[in-house]
Amino acid sequence: MINRIDTAVILAAGLGSRLGDLKDGKPKAFLEIEGISLIERSIEALRSRGIQRIIIGTGYENHHFDNLADKYEQVITRRNERFDSTGSMYTLFLLKDMVTQPFLLLEGDLLYEPAALDYLLDDGHDEIILASTATHSGDEVFIEASHEGMLLNMSKNRDALNAIAGELVGISKLSVAGLQSMCQFAQQRYDAQHYGIHYEDAMVGASASSDFFVKVVDDLAWCEIDDHAHLERAMNSVYPKIKERSKL
């Protein structure tokens, strides 16, 4: 049985320093493709799939996200005051009391075909990590999975893994129990004053007690935009494919 999902969490606290002047003083989620920002593309895709509550974890120049909360009734924001010295898991950790039911987890700097959401919403697994086949985009996070498709490890160093099942897209589906397992792992690191871990590190840590299914989709149109090269790929390769598929 597939539980209805009507909540999403978007992690968007980062500085995005590698993009430099391209950000125009805004968070990188506000980079525009044909006049529409990445974050608003995500919001619209989520709303079109019945998501009624969109929690955005903010940090750098958070007022831009707060303006979105005025524009969209579904949007709620909460700021990570330590955004410049903590990893993405800390932002998610700060939002844990706001999440009371299964939800979608997204990174804020993604450009993706909206159908990516359907792969998670239509799948009955409680915890799903969306993965793609090789993109050769640079800065990939590679995923190692068991024969049953369950998460074993993730790393940007492919040589650290025994085998590669796919690349992390940055869109997942989680239950409250899965989030709690991740937060328990993170709490142990925070107790040791290690605040730099990212949510994918917590997924790997929590996989010792929770099953995270790795759903690999071939030829998924998506990209993360962290630097100039990523933006060029988004404009010249990924977005044209998304646009073409939207006509089908």
Image: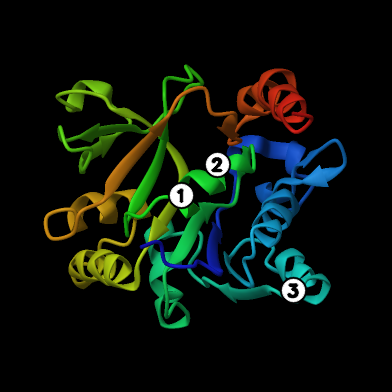
On the image, the x and y values in percent for residue 195 come to 32, 62
Closest to the observer, 238 or 27:
238
Residue lying at 32% horizontally and 60% vertically, measured from the top left:
126
Q: Amino acid at mark 1?
A: Leu
In the shown orientation, is residue 221 left or right of residue 148?
right
- The residue indicated by pointer 1 is 120
Nearest to the eye among marks 2 and 3: give it.
2
- Separation of disc 1 and disc 2 at Cα? 7 Å
On the image, the x and y values in percent for residue 120 come to 46, 49
On the image, the x and y values in percent for residue 6 come to 56, 69
Instruction: Please determine whether, in this image, residue 101 is positioned above or below residue 31.
Output: below
Instruction: Please determine whether, in this image, residue 122 is positioned above or below residue 165.
Output: below
In the shown orientation, is residue 229 left or right of residue 32?
left
- The residue indicated by pointer 2 is 116
Secondary element at tag 3: helix
Quadrant in the picture for residue 141:
top left
Q: How many marks?
A: 3
Residue lying at 37% horizontally and 46% vertically, measured from the top left:
129
Secondary element at tag 1: helix
Give the residue furthest to the front: 1
Residue lying at 20% horizontally and 64% vertically, measured from the top left:
185
Secondary element at tag 2: helix
Closest to the observer, 51 or 25:
51
Q: Which label belongs to residue 69?
A: 3
Could you classify mark 3 by the number of other residues whose Cα lies within 10 Å: few (under 14), some (14-19), or many (20 or more)?
A: some
- Separation of disc 2 and disc 3 at Cα? 24 Å
Q: For the residues labelled 1 and 2, say whether their Cβ atoms are less than 8 Å apart.
A: yes
